[in-house]
Structures are given as structure tokens and as C-alpha cells.
Image (spheres, helix red, strand yellow):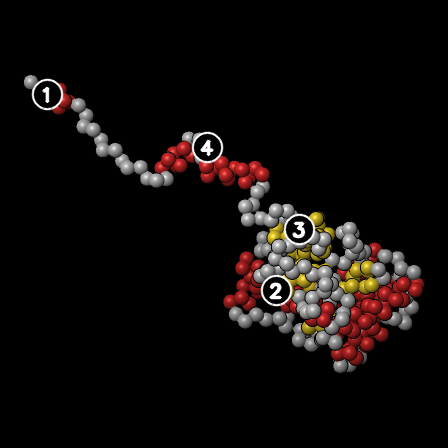
Amino acid sequence: MRDPEQFTEPSRKRRRRRFDDEIDTRARRGAPTELTDISALDERHGIDPDGPPEGDRWSTWDGAEHGPEPLPAWVITEHAAVDTELGVLKTGKEADVHLVERAVPGTGRRTLLAAKRYRSAEHRLFHRDAGYLEGRRVRRSREMRAMANRTGFGRDLLAGQWAGAEFAALGRLWSAGVAVPYPVQVDGTELLLEFIGTDDGTAAPRLAQLRPDPEQLCDLWHQLVDALLGLTRHGLTHGDLSAYNLLVHDGRLVLIDLPQVVDVIGNPQGPAFLARDAQRMAEWFIAHGLSADAGPDTLLDELHAELGMPPAAGTSDG
């Protein structure tokens, strides 16, 4: 007779379990693990292990490109500072502007900043940027082609160019005494600027919102002419100037929104942009009661003289 043990199924060799099998198996069964518990805790409470004890993020001062020196006393440079989002000041097709508080915890040091964040490749950028970009160049032909063809990579480059161009122009103009916000820093497509407004976060009104009396209107006109002359001394014009990108804070006129700043000489369309800026502003002031003697031609001739250009032949088309 055969031994009964001959009919039994041979025993299988037990597979050696890898060190991570237990975690994988328990996770598949839905059992809590130490790793999933930690992850769930962070997601449930919004905890960032590397984040600041308060506020939304650590200050981005370290690693960013900084504004011109001497730094204003209100600029906070401490590495222990934190940034807190306080809301949206303005939304636009190309960029949004947020109100941010930068403060050093445990001290009274705080300042309000305007955070201008340019849109990425997924969003619409400047719909008229071709004319503004004439005269601007980058070193690599691949990057020039990408921007010209509006590829995703090219649109990201354009967003960075707008932020960098505005930061550079503001630094140059602020150092020259032109009435523009102080550019605190630029980091990629985020530009942090001096907040023009009150300590409680109320932004200064735009010129378009005001109905100035004759004396204030005359004063604001002279401030505008001084600011435009300050631009032309550097061979520049705003490029898209209107009563909507001029702020008035405590009687002081401040130019904002300069990403499309135009080199009047280097850009073939520069003189046309200069004429349009002059015409728009002269017409706004005249419509609000300024003497017609301060017309577009008069202003443009003054700007041309500063640039060393011949007088304007006549009023430019708007």
C-alpha cells in the first residue's frame, strides 16, 4: 500500500515579505497606518510642517531680486518675517493685485504691500503686447521664437518679462525721484510694491474717481507733467496712460501699472505711444475744467523738447 502522505499536497515555500508589504496591504484594506494618519491630519487641519506659526507663508525676501538702495525704512528684510494675504485690490486680464501684510511676529514691525501677480501660461496675457515688445530682446533665439509663437513656454517667458520690465522701470524711475511706488522685490512673476493707501488697507483712489476743484486740478496737472518729463528724461513713456492708472494719495499723484513702459527711441512705435499718452491725459484734464491752453500739442511739444525731438506736427490719433 501506498503511504497516505504521498497523496498530500506538497507544502509551498513561504514567500519572504518585503519590508513595505505590511503598509501596502493595510492601506489597501483601508486600515489606518502611521503615514496615512499623518497625511490625513495635515489635510484635515491645513497644516504645513514647514510653514510659519502664523500668517500664510514665510517672507519671500530671501532669494528674490530687491529694489534699489537706499531701502526705505519701512521695508522688512528679516528672514523671520511672514506674509499674510488680506484680500484682492484689483483684478485684470494680465495680472491681479493682492494686499499682503509682511510682519515680524512678536514685534510691532509690519508693512502693507501690493502683490502684483502676472498670469501664467493658462491665462490670457497682454492682447496688444506685440507693439510694446518691439525693441525688447532676449539672448536666446529659442526664447524669442517661443514668445513670438505664443507657446506655453513662450507665454510663461512673456509673463516673466512683464514683471521684470515693470520692476526695472520702477526702480529706475523711483531712484530718479519720479512719483511711482517703490518696487520692493520681484520673484518670478510676482512683484511686491509699496502699497499706496492708508494703514487700514484702504487703497488710494484713482484719478478717474475724483472730481477735483480748480485749484486741485491745476496742481495735479503740474504733477502729471513733472512725472511725464521724468519718464522722458529716461527716454520712456508709460505706453498705456489714462486716469485709471494714476493714484492720488494725500494730494500726491502716483503713476502705476508700468509693465508695458515703452522706449520712445528704441521702439519704432515709441513716438506714437508718447503722443497717445499725452493726448489722453490732456483731454481728461480739459474735460474736467483745465484751460484748453494745456492741450495735447502743448504737452507733446514739451515732452519732445525733453527728448531732443522736433515739435509735434499736430495732435496724434487716440
Marked residue nearer the N-terminal end (2 or 1): 1
Residue at 69% across, 61% down: 75
- Mark 3 packing: few (<14 Cα in 10 Å), some, or many (20+)? some
Position of residue 278 relative to residue 47, above or below, is below
- In terms of depth relative to the viewer, which is nearer, 97 or 68? 68
- The residue pinned by badge 3 equals 105
Marks 2 and 3, how far apart in space?
Answer: 23 Å
**Residue 102 placement, left or right of 10:** right
| Dot 3 and dot 1 residues touching (CB under 8 Å) | no
- Mark 1 packing: few (<14 Cα in 10 Å), some, or many (20+)? few
Marked residue nearer the N-terminal end (2 or 3): 2
Residue at 34% across, 40% down: 19
Marked residue nearer the N-terminal end (4 or 2): 4
- The residue pinned by badge 4 equals 32
Residue at 32% across, 39% down: 18
Marks 2 and 1, how far apart in space?
Answer: 86 Å
The disc placed on residue 65 is: 2
Q: Of the residues shown, which amino acid type is indicated by label 3?
A: Pro
